[in-house]
Image (cartoon, rainbow, N blue to C red):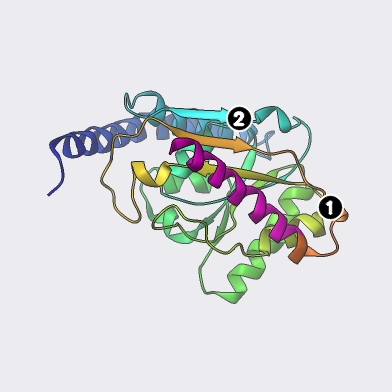
């Protein structure tokens, strides 16, 4: 049986989610209509989407996100951002970076009212799981976006962790970085899985979510994509271990 606090927080967050979507989507649509002819990269719309995502953190009294390392991101440089993935909350939290990027997201998210529609307006990169052609198309579009100056955000594990432990990193993010000749920035997230566990939608009280943005890694400094993949996984794994040791 869920606690009364969990029930109240969940009702509050769901109500907030719907209310914000209803208010913010028409604004996003107007931004798209008026800026699409000259803002091909959707920079203004993405900035607005960052506010949209972040408002769920700002208006949740029991959630606090501590950021470290944003200064490692240069304004006019495209990157492949590689993050671990713990819960649905990761997406909302990473919007709080307030940096321009394109999500690599599964196609099922497009069916989510308002949120999916906004993703389409932003021209994010969509992939169908277990579809070889879709994976190839995703890689091609990601490389194109990177060459046009857009950063790309991808969850290297490919799916959410059930218990917060790190899964095996896939090489796709590192292959696209190598082909587009852009740096990779590792991002470590922790305690998001405590706020929204696994595939559940129940909201829990958490006050110590953490994000660390690491300095960029140049694919040219590594022998191959296997080596840089292992290095990024080592960096994120080490940071998770450090955070959890400090909590004991």
Name the residue rendered at 23%, 32% in the picture.
Answer: 12
- Label 2: which residue? 68
For marks 2 and 1 on the same chain, the one whose residue lies earlier in the sequence: 2
- Residue identified by numbered label 1: 181
Most common secondary structure along the magenta stretch: helix
Give coordinates of residue 240: x percent, y percent.
Answer: 54, 45
Residue 241 is situated, as x and y percent measured from the top left of the image, at: 54, 47
Q: Is residue 193 positioned above or below 42 on the image?
A: below
Frontmost residue, 121 versus 84: 84
> Few, some or many C-alpha atoms within 10 Å of disc 1 (few <14, some 14-19, many ≥20)?
some
| Residue situated in front as seen by the camera: 149 or 30 | 149
With 189 as the anchor, is 23 left or right in this view?
A: left
Q: Is residue 235 left or right of residue 189?
A: right
Q: What residue is drawn where x is 52% and y is 74%?
A: 130
Q: Nearer the viewer, residue 133 or 25?
A: 133
Question: What span is colored magenta in the figure?
Answer: 228-248
Identity of the residue drawn at 80% across and 54% down: 180
Q: Residue 143: x percent and y percent?
A: 74, 56
Q: Is residue 82 visible?
A: no
Residue 239 sits inside the magenta stretch: yes
Name the secondary structure under disc 2. strand
235 lies above or below 10: below
């Amino acid at each position: 049986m869920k606690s009364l606090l969990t029930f109240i927080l969940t009702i509050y967050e769901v109500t907030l989610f719907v209310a914000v979507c209803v208010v913010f989507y028409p604004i996003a649509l107007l931004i798209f209509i008026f800026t699409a002819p000259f803002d091909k990269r959707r920079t203004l719309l993405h900035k607005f989407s960052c506010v949209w995502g972040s408002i769920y953190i700002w208006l949740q009294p029991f959630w606090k996100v501590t950021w470290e390392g944003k200064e490692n991101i240069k304004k006019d440089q495209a990157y492949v951002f590689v993050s671990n993935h713990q819960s649905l909350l990761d997406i909302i939290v990473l919007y709080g970076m307030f940096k321009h990027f394109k999500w690599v997201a599964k196609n099922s998210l497009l069916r989510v009212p308002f949120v999916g529609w906004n993703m389409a307006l932003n021209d994010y990169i969509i992939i169908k799981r277990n579809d070889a052609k879709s994976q190839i198309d995703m890689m091609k579009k990601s490389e194109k976006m990177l060459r046009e100056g857009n950063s790309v955000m991808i969850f290297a594990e490919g799916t959410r962790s059930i218990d917060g432990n790190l899964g095996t990193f896939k090489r796709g993010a590192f292959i696209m970085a190598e082909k587009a000749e852009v740096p990779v920035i590792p991002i470590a997230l922790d305690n998001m899985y405590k706020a929204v566990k696994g595939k559940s939608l129940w909201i829990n009280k958490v006050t110590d979510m953490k994000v660390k943005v690491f300095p960029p890694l140049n694919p040219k400094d590594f022998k191959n994509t296997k080596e840089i993949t292992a290095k990024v996984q080592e960096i994120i794994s080490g940071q998770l271990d450090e955070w959890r040791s400090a909590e004991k």
